[in-house]
Image: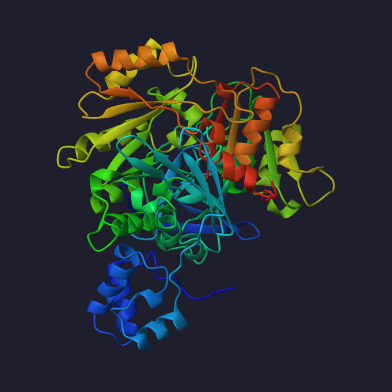
């Protein structure tokens, strides 16, 4: 069923990268990092799902989005300003973090659930492998680098330089991994499917790979 | 490149609007529908119930919009797999003749966004939604089209992720003014996208098949990432409620994987979660795909599942495998045919 929505007032809009923004509103609900909300411009309008990108204990909730020029919602979200009303659901979903070691894999706005986990303090024994085209496309990189340190790996497919691993994220994944490490993979369907196939080829059991596809 | 819009794939309402735009009476829209869908014309010249002047004008401004398949593979069992050009790529449609029926398994998208572990189509990533024209062209341009008795939306793509085009294609497929298939002859299969499923039930009366594949939610999400956001329990709750006022036939698609979802424990849980829903189960043999970590269940496990479910009052059949010698599992043929996969930056 379509998720019941309620109005929230946007408190601020923050640029997250070229053609990417985070929309914030006052948080008055509890949630688990990694969960999503349904979001719409009107109470009964088309809904799209977004992972919360903010921490479980922060005063604001927020979602990260990038512009899909052919999309219906994001060109409209792009012009939303502080003070405007959006309609969001209660958080739901089961792509949530667990204690213990894990490797997180993300591209694009698929980093949002991991941003939420980091902002919720879930950093111990976690490695994040983030893929993007150029240095400016790594959403949340300052925060992630600060919190994860050497466990934050940025794979740039069309850029080089300090702190960047040159090459595609999926190339980086093509290495031996401990078989008992859980993987959390989030992003575009193409990346998720390719990353999962590579990990399976590297001996990671499919039951250890949890995926969330943005669609 | 021909930029004229296609008329095949337009609903009656759209054809009436087009007719009005050409300065014609509303009934001309119905004449167009009759020509396109019932008389199955291939050119406007064949629409002899229209004036010559109107036919010329239609020719100038529109195309009928039919596209022949570019490739066909025939199986020894009579199944044929067609490759249709669509959205600059290819989609697959499988013609499956049987003793009493002839079924077309058609595609609704090029590629797919859902990323199911066992699916070859998902390995293409998502490429494009098919238009109504491209969905129905698989029915109309199939050489065996006139023999078809049944249509199933079980090919490439997730139909409910291309909701409006799927619904409009269903309208044309089942309307008296359209292709005239009975609603009992058409089945849409989905992994269960909830808001879209609700819309589908409110706007179409065709049959529905849920791709379930594992009754345990924690295990199902290892196979179907969508489980993370559209929980099976919510989908079944919707179907249970919908069935109180909706008599359409519901079924479960269940691909059986050895040791993964074919144990007595899974049968027991299936029985539990399907309680209170009038639904039948189709057990499906897995067509292995390259690089998969999954193996299909053996015959004994399939039979045991079928018998156990039947004993518990859930009508269950094992679907006969067809076209195994021609890559009949959806996505295999077109993925091979993609000349160069799109390389994305990640």
Q: In the figure, is residue A180 to the left or right of A207? A: right
Which residue is drawn at the image coordinates 44% and 19% (left, top)?
Answer: B261
Residue B326: % across, % down: 55, 36
Residue B325: % across, % down: 55, 32
Residue A141: % across, % down: 69, 46
Residue B275: % across, % down: 23, 23
**Taking A9 as reference, is B82 above or below it?**
above
Q: In the figure, is residue B309 to the left or right of B2? A: left
Identify the residue at the far left of this view: B245
In-front residue for pair A123/A36: A36
Where is residue A31, by image quadrant?
top left
- Image quarter (top left, top right, bottom left or bottom right) of the N terminus of chain B: bottom right
Is any part of residue A173 visible from this angle? yes
Q: In the figure, is residue B43 to the left or right of A185? A: left
Which residue is drawn at the image coordinates 30% and 23% (left, top)?
Answer: B316
In-front residue for pair B273/A67: B273
């Amino acid at each position: 069923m379509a998720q019941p929505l309620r109005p929230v007032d946007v408190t601020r809009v923050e640029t997250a990268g070229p053609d990417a923004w985070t929309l914030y509103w006052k948080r008055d609900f509890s949630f688990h990092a990694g969960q999503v909300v349904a979001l719409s411009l009107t109470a009964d309008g088309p809904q799209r799902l977004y992972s919360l990108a903010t921490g479980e204990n922060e005063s604001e909730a927020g979602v990260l989005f990038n512009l899909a020029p052919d999309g219906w919602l994001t060109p409209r979200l792009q012009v939303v300003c502080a003070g405007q009303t959006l309609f969001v659901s209660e958080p739901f979903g089961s792509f949530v973090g667990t204690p213990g070691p894990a490797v997180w894999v993300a591209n694009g706005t698929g980093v949002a659930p991991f941003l939420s986990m980091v902002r919720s303090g879930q950093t111990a024994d976690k490695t994040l492998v983030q893929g993007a085209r150029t240095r400016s496309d790594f959403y949340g990189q300052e925060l992630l680098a600060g919190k994860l340190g050497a466990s934050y790996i940025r794979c740039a497919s069309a850029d080089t330089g300090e702190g960047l691993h040159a090459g595609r994220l999926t190339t980086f994944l093509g290495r031996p991994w401990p078989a008992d490490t859980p993987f959390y993979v989030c992003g575009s369907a193409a990346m998720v499917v390719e990353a999962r196939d590579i990990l399976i080829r590297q001996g990671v059991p499919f039951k250890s790979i949890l995926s969330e596809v943005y669609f | 490149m021909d930029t004229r819009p296609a008329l095949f794939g337009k609903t009656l309402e759209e054809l009436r609007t087009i007719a009005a735009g050409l300065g014609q009476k509303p009934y001309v829209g119905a004449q167009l529908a009759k020509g396109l869908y019932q008389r199955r014309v291939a050119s406007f010249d064949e629409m002899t119930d229209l004036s010559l002047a109107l036919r010329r004008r239609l020719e100038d401004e529109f195309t009928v919009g039919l596209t022949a398949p570019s490739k066909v593979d025939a199986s020894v069992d009579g199944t044929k797999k067609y490759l249709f050009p669509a959205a600059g790529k290819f989609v697959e449609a499988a013609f499956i003749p049987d003793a009493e029926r002839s079924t077309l398994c058609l595609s609704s998208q090029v590629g797919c966004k859902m990323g199911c572990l066992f699916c070859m189509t998902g390995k293409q990533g998502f490429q494009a939604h098919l238009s109504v024209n491209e969905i129905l062209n698989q029915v109309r341009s199939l050489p065996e089209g006139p023999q078809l008795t049944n249509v199933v939306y079980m090919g490439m793509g997730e139909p409910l992720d291309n909701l409006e085009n799927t619904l409009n294609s269903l309208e044309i497929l089942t309307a008296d003014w359209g292709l005239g298939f009975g609603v009992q002859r058409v089945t849409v299969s989905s992994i269960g996208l909830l808001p879209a499923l609700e819309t589908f039930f409110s706007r179409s009366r065709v049959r529905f098949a849920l791709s379930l594949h594992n009754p345990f939610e924690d295990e199902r999400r290892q196979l179907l990432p969508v489980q993370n956001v559209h929980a099976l329990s919510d989908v079944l709750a919707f179907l249970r409620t919908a069935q109180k006022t909706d008599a359409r036939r519901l079924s479960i698609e269940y691909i059986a994987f050895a040791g993964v979802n074919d144990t007595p424990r899974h049968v027991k849980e299936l029985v539990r979660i399907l309680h209170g829903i009038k639904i039948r189960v189709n057990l499906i043999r897995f067509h292995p795909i390259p690089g998969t970590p999954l193996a299909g269940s053996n015959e004994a496990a399939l039979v045991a599942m079928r018998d156990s479910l039947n004993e518990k009052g859930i009508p269950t059949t094992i679907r006969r495998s067809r076209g195994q010698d021609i890559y009949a599992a959806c996505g295999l043929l077109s993925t091979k045919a993609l000349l160069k996969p799109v390389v994305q930056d990640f």
